[in-house]
Amino acid sequence: MKTAVINIGCKVNQCECDSLMTGLKALGHEVTDELVFADNYVINTCAVTKEAERKSRQFVGKVKKINPKADVYVIGCASEKNAEQFSIKGVKYISGTARKEDVLQMLSGVHISEIPEVYESLPQGTIFRARAYVKVEDGCNNFCSYCIIPYLRGRVRSRSIESIREECIKAAETTDEIVLTGINLSAYGSDIGLTLADLVSALSDLPVRLRLGSLEVNVVTESFLDAVVASEKICPHFHLSLQSGSDGVLKEMNRHYTTEEYRMKVSLIRTYFPSAAITTDIIVGFPTETEEQFEESLAFAREIGFANIHVFPYSRRLGTAAYPLGTLPDQVMTDRVNRMIALRNELKKAYESPFVGSELEVVVESSDGVFAEGYSENYIRVYIPDRDYSVGKKIIVTIEGERADGLLAR
Ligand code: SF4
């Protein structure tokens, strides 16, 4: 029995897919994460943007084309938001963000589960990629005005440190890098009397480097950074979610910080890690964003000197507080997205270029026989002339030049 587990969404979805693949393997299934012929398909959907939701529906059509007789199991945020859109012929099971492990029991029939109030464990994931993604938390209490996720994933639920350690110890047998992920990683522990700093400290004896997933401004404090420094395992890469560089827009987004607070947090990080990569997400074209506010956002991104920016065009989601605000005209959106991407490219180069001549520690992710490639501790993509490097293992390289999408090592 062959089962394909397809991920449409974020790193948290990816962790869940890995866990399901491990569980299916234990049940004797041949598993794959590729869009190939299979007897069953599990599709872990995403609803963060309209495009992600459309893609999720499209994948159901794609797998039915590959094998019209296959059983399709749909889970995740898009089916939590609107199960009906997946009620099509051949879809055997529809669930939401809860009880994903039910797929392992191959239940039949349409079923929407309640969102749980405590952390729900899936089987521990085996590593199917060079880096291991370990999910430590689910849910979010923030209710940013544009975001549907708290409605779909529920409130913050943290996984126990013991369970996280157990998975990390197993992952460390096959990889040199573990990424800690969560829907709102910064809120880790808030429901069980712990903090993210506690988790960082509890993992400091692992023989791997650890990378933190997306962080919120509020988590960056001296005590948090003290724990990060003391651990000696956390990569000097902080993905600090910004979303807008305009105070007016941040207020409309219900983001609970100002650009001044953000600036101070970045400066604090840089006192501990002077050459850390500060990366971020920016939503372009929030419905109330004026041209002047967009220019404030550009200027702020330039001032911070982000090492990379994930640029998201605003996506209107029914059920969110911002939905009634409508959308900006398409040409305004396209123009702003292009301008933010151009700035992103310029800042990325400016961050990466000074590392030519330096040594970086790269965890190899793939190798095509000509080049091996992977990410450095400060999240720069590095290409290395291939000499049979082991995928998942770290190597120290000297950077000798630049490429369009990263750096070249010898
Ligand atoms: S912090 Fe905001 S954007 Fe992130 S998941 Fe929570 S509500 Fe959504």
Image (cartoon, rainbow, N blue to C red):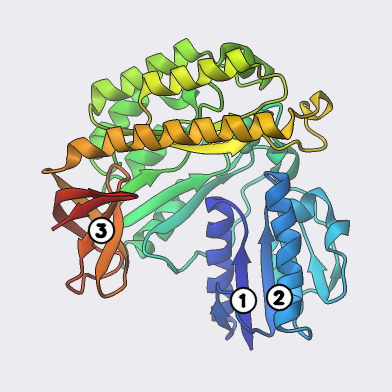
Quarter of image, res 170 = bottom left
Q: Are marks 1 and 2 in contact (CB under 8 Å)?
A: yes
Quarter of image, res 315 = top right
Identify the residue at horizontal 40%, vertical 40% (top origin).
Answer: 199
Residue beneath disc 1: 4
Q: CA distance from mark 1 to mark 2?
A: 9 Å
Q: Is residue 335 above or below residue 410?
A: above
Identify the residue at horizontal 57%, vertical 20% (top origin).
Answer: 294
Residue 373, image x, y percentages: 29, 61
Residue 229, image x, y percentages: 25, 32
Q: CA distance from mark 2 to mark 3?
A: 34 Å
Quarter of image, res 48 = top right
| Element assignment for label 2 | helix
Residue density around tag 2, few if under 14, some if 14–19, many if 20 or more, within 10 Å:
many
Could you say which disc has been placed on residue 282 in the image? Answer: none
Quadrant (top left/top right/bottom left/bottom right) for the N terminus = bottom right
Does residue 25 appear in this view? Answer: yes
| Element assignment for label 1 | strand
Q: Are marks 3 and 1 in contact (CB under 8 Å)?
A: no
Residue beneath disc 2: 63
Residue density around tag 3, few if under 14, some if 14–19, many if 20 or more, within 10 Å:
many
Mark 3 and ligand 1: say if the CB distance to the nearest ligand atom is below 8 Å. no
Q: Is residue 124 left or right of residue 170?
A: right
Name which residue type carries label 2: Val
Residue beneath disc 3: 383
Residue 350, image x, y percentages: 29, 33
Which numbered disc flags the more N-terminal residue, 3 or 1? 1
